[in-house]
Image (tube, rainbow, N blue to C red):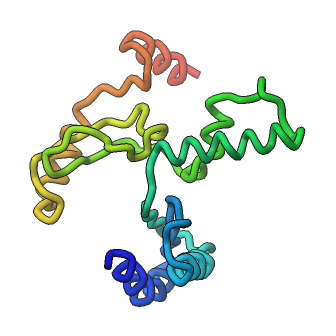
Amino acid sequence: MLMDLFLSTLDRETERLHKNKVRLRVIGDRAAFSPQLQDKIAASERLTIENDRMDLIIAANYGGRWDIVNAVRRIADQIERGERKGLEISEELLGSHLSTADLPEPDLFIRTGGEQRVSNFLLWQLAYTELFFTPTLWPDFDENLLDQAFADFSSRHRRFGGTGEQVEAFSVQTTSR
């Protein structure tokens, strides 16, 4: 039933996305989808690929572990074909093979419904993302709660894996150049 809803939504909304210059992208394992849905996703993405006003990324049948395993498989295939060596594997190389490789890493992850975990979502990409948890269910998450999440986010001192002193030293170096 969910896949039928997905298909009918694509049928109904793709043209409007295109008209509003929104690029649609679906990330996740499409193999479980019907051929009809796979074709519709591909057609919707093709139609909107040149749009540049906004990106709409839909994670359907997506898992962070799935994404990492697929990236590793693509790199392994390159190694088997002799296109690269195992010693070339780095965080940057792995990241460049993820389904979100061309997107910036999220700054803020908002989890609704009282859950306090990322639930296998964007595992690699969330490494330095700030997390905001709320007991409010998604349908009730409103503009006031979004403002609260933004206020909480803006009050944080982001260190991206460094200590506060390292971040300060880096900030001083980059602003004095």
x and y, in percent, of residue 9 in the image: 38, 83
x and y, in percent, of residue 130 in the image: 32, 36
The quarter holding residue 44 reads bottom right
Answer above or below: position of 113 versus 138.
above
x and y, in percent, of residue 129 in the image: 37, 36
Residue drawn at x 81%, y 37% is 79
- Between 93 and 33, which is closer to the camera in this rendering? 33
Residue drawn at x 67%, y 28% is 90
Residue drawn at x 53%, y 47% is 67
- With 134 as the anchor, is 125 left or right in this view? right
Answer above or below: position of 49 versus 152.
below
Answer above or below: position of 1 versus 26.
below
- With 162 as the anchor, is 67 left or right in this view? right
- With 14 as the anchor, is 138 left or right in this view? left
Image label count: 0
Residue drawn at x 87%, y 43% is 81
x and y, in percent, of residue 125 in the image: 47, 40
Answer above or below: position of 153 versus 156.
below
Where does the N terminus fall, quadrant-wise?
Answer: bottom left
- Between 37 and 140, which is closer to the camera in this rendering? 37
- Between 109 and 168, which is closer to the camera in this rendering? 109
Where does the C terminus fall, quadrant-wise?
Answer: top right
Residue most extreme to the top: 165
